[in-house]
Amino acid sequence: MTPEAVLTDLGDTSALANVRLHWDLSMAEMPAGDPDFLRDEVWRSCSRYCGFGDALDGVLARVAEAARETPALRLLAWHAYWRVFLSPETCPPNGWPEPERHLGEDAGGLLLLVALGFVPLLRAKHREWGIPEEVTRETAQQVRCYCDDAYRRGHAGRPGVYPGPLAWLRHYTREKYVRLGRFEYWLGPNPHRIEVFRHRRSGRVMALAPDGTRFARDGSIYRDPGDYAPGEGWTATLQHTTDGVAGCPIDPRGAGTPGNVLLAARDWECVLKHGDPSLMMHIPSGGRMTPEACRESLLQAAGFFPRFFPQSPPRAVVCASWIFSPPLQDIFGGQANLSVFQKNLYLFPVPSGPWDGLWFVFLQNGPLDLERVPCETSLQRGIRDYLRQGHRWRCGGMFFLLDDLPRFGTEPYLKDWLPTP
């Protein structure tokens, strides 16, 4: 069947342009029989491994049977699986149709079966690296988070997985990616272009902005250059000389500061730059981000990766996310768990649009109608009210140098912060 015929049979051709991508390549690799993830013994085992128990067996059994018997469903499910896990290049299933004509209220179960299909891939990759089974099993819980904490919220309790989170599972099967306590991490080169320096005697840390970075008046960075007012803000420079480095310092509360500083080479050492081995952090849903849980997860990561991947010992934990938006401290106050966590990190601005990351809060893409967004949680109400007051939303980045783990909990970067050397 062609993608046009498949979507016509499903009764929704709106995603044709996306579904058509790599269709022939995907179909060329489709197994002669049913894909493994549609077989009852496979999805049932994967569901247990992800922590669902038998609660979803009825829905998944109905969906798997329908997919095995309906060519359009089987082809669409395989194509999603191939796109996420087997495609040589990243090709997320954005805007994927939900086959309600054939599955009714069980429609979300089709992509949930695809998501469960990542378990054999994850287990094989972790066995290759010698990662303990208990770590693999904990990492696999993310499928349950995507179902219970996201899809069910937006679908009156019915199970499923959104296409965006499904696409993220590709990382788990290709990167050195694990969950350790409260957080998830994967090992790789630092993707951020800030440069981080430590004073050789005092231990003070200062981050400098990448050369050419344009800042808004509040020290944030707009993703769309058209969002800057004429003449607004300033542009950072970064210059290395034999005597040291001159650049625009970044306040660890997450903003650029105007003006340059000179960090003398005899006094300051670069401890983190673009490409250095680092741990990218992902924060699963579920709350319970107590200072103790955060610290314990960081300690686990600091011990785990040098043990299993000694060839690339990480220097820092890094992340860019809506979770590290500096306004969250204003919204929730300084004693909230997330605020306490932020204050123990070095925050830095990242290019951001006014709605970036808010899908994870409201399950809606922007622009948002602030009079109609869900307001069931304190997080939703707090962000809604912040935006209704005329503030602009922004995401944020963070790093935490693993050498500073003994000082986690003391706000090490804020405590020592001065905008001068």
Image (cartoon, rainbow, N blue to C red):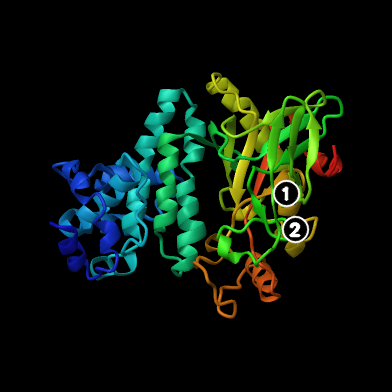
Q: Identity of the amino acid at label 1?
A: Gln
Residue 184 quadrant = top right
Residue 57 shows up from this direction: no
Left or right for 370, reference 67: right
Q: Which mark is residue 342?
A: 1
The secondary structure type at the circle numbered 1 is helix
Badge 2: residue crowd in 10 Å (few <14, some 14–19, many ≥20): some
Residue 41 shows up from this direction: yes
The percent position of residue 318, horizontal first and vertical second, equals 62, 40
The percent position of residue 302, horizontal first and vertical second, equals 64, 29
Residue 323 quadrant = bottom right
Residue at 69%, 47% (x, y): give it.
236
From the viewer's perspective, is residue 354 above or below residue 406?
below
| Quadrant for the N terminus in the image | bottom left
| Residue found at the very far bottom of the displayed protein | 371
The secondary structure type at the circle numbered 2 is helix
Left or right for 386, reference 313: right
The front one of 178 and 19 is: 19
Residue 411 quadrant = top right
Q: Which mark is residue 310?
A: none
The residue under label 2 is 329
Q: Identity of the amino acid at label 2?
A: Gln
The percent position of residue 115, horizontal first and vertical second, equals 37, 49
Residue at 47%, 54% (x, y): give it.
146
